[in-house]
Each structure stands twice: as structure tokens, then as C-alpha cells.
Amino acid sequence: GSMPVGRPGGGLGAPAAARMAKMKHEEKTKKVSRSGKTRKQCLAELIEKVKKAGGPDLAAEGWKCELRPSTKAAASQSADDAVELDPVYLDGDGNEFFGRKEVLKHLGLKKSE
């Protein structure tokens, strides 16, 4: 027989929803990216990098950092594994940038490593 469409095997529906609720709950606890940094640390580093490169003060412009599960990791990991989190930077308008390189590019700055 054919599998009904729209029903992934192993019934992912409920656990995924439960995981989301759990993630919301854990928002208060310390989440760190795979490099072991918190959102604040990732953002602080970005702000520092941009300033060094002669860019604007991102803190004053309302930039934020969120840690999101890495899409690459999500595809290759089972639900039980610790999810790798990647920092996603958001500017004041809510535009998303995945990684510092993209932010520097967006600001027209050269990366000064």
C-alpha cells in the first residue's frame, strides 16, 4: 500500500510541537551557539568587528542576534541530538544575516581578520 501523503513516518506532528513549546520555555535558560557563545557574546563580537572595520555602531542601530538551529544540522541529526545553533543577526528593520561575513558585506565593509 502507499503511504498517505502529508503524514511523515513516525508521526512527527506532536513531538515537534512539544519541542517548540520546550524551546520557548528554555529561552530563559542559557542557549549557546555551536562555538559555545551566547547570543549576547555573538552580537558583541559582531559589533566589535564592525566598529574595527570602520562601520556604524550596530548596538545603537538596534541590531539583535538570535540563535537558530542550523539547517544543515537539522537535516542530518535525529531529534534527540543536541541541536547546533547558528547565530543569525537581525538589523533594526528585521532583515536577517547569517553570519558576520554577510553583515560586513551588507554594510559594505571589508573583513579585517
Image (tube, rainbow, N blue to C red):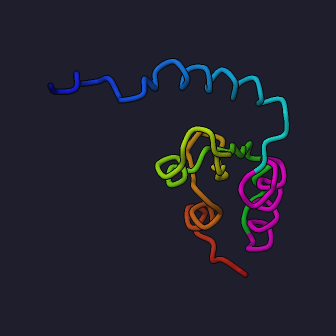
Residue appearing at x 78%, y 42% in the figure: 31
Front one among 57 and 90: 90
Q: Position of residue 73 (x, y in %)?
A: 55, 52
Q: Is residue 97 left or right of residue 49?
A: left
The quarter holding residue 81 reads top right
Residue appearing at x 75%, y 61% in the figure: 35
Residue appearing at x 59%, y 39% in the figure: 94
Residue farthest toward the left in the current orientation of the protein? 1
Front one among 75 and 60: 75
Q: Position of residue 82 (x, y in %)?
A: 68, 46
Quadrant (top left, top right, bottom left, bottom right) of the N terminus = top left
Q: Position of residue 4 (x, y in %)?
A: 22, 21
Q: Position of residue 24 (x, y in %)?
A: 70, 25
Residue appearing at x 83%, y 48% in the figure: 40
The mark total stands at: 0
Specify the segment rendered in magenta.
Answer: 33-54
Up/down of 16 relative to 52, above or below: above
Quadrant (top left, top right, bottom left, bottom right) of the C terminus = bottom right
Front one among 82 and 31: 82
Our reading of the magenta stretch's main secondary structure is helix
Queried whether the magenta region covers residue 78, the answer comes back as: no
Front one among 50 and 65: 65
Up/down of 6 relative to 84, above or below: above
Residue farthest toward the front in the current orientation of the protein? 1
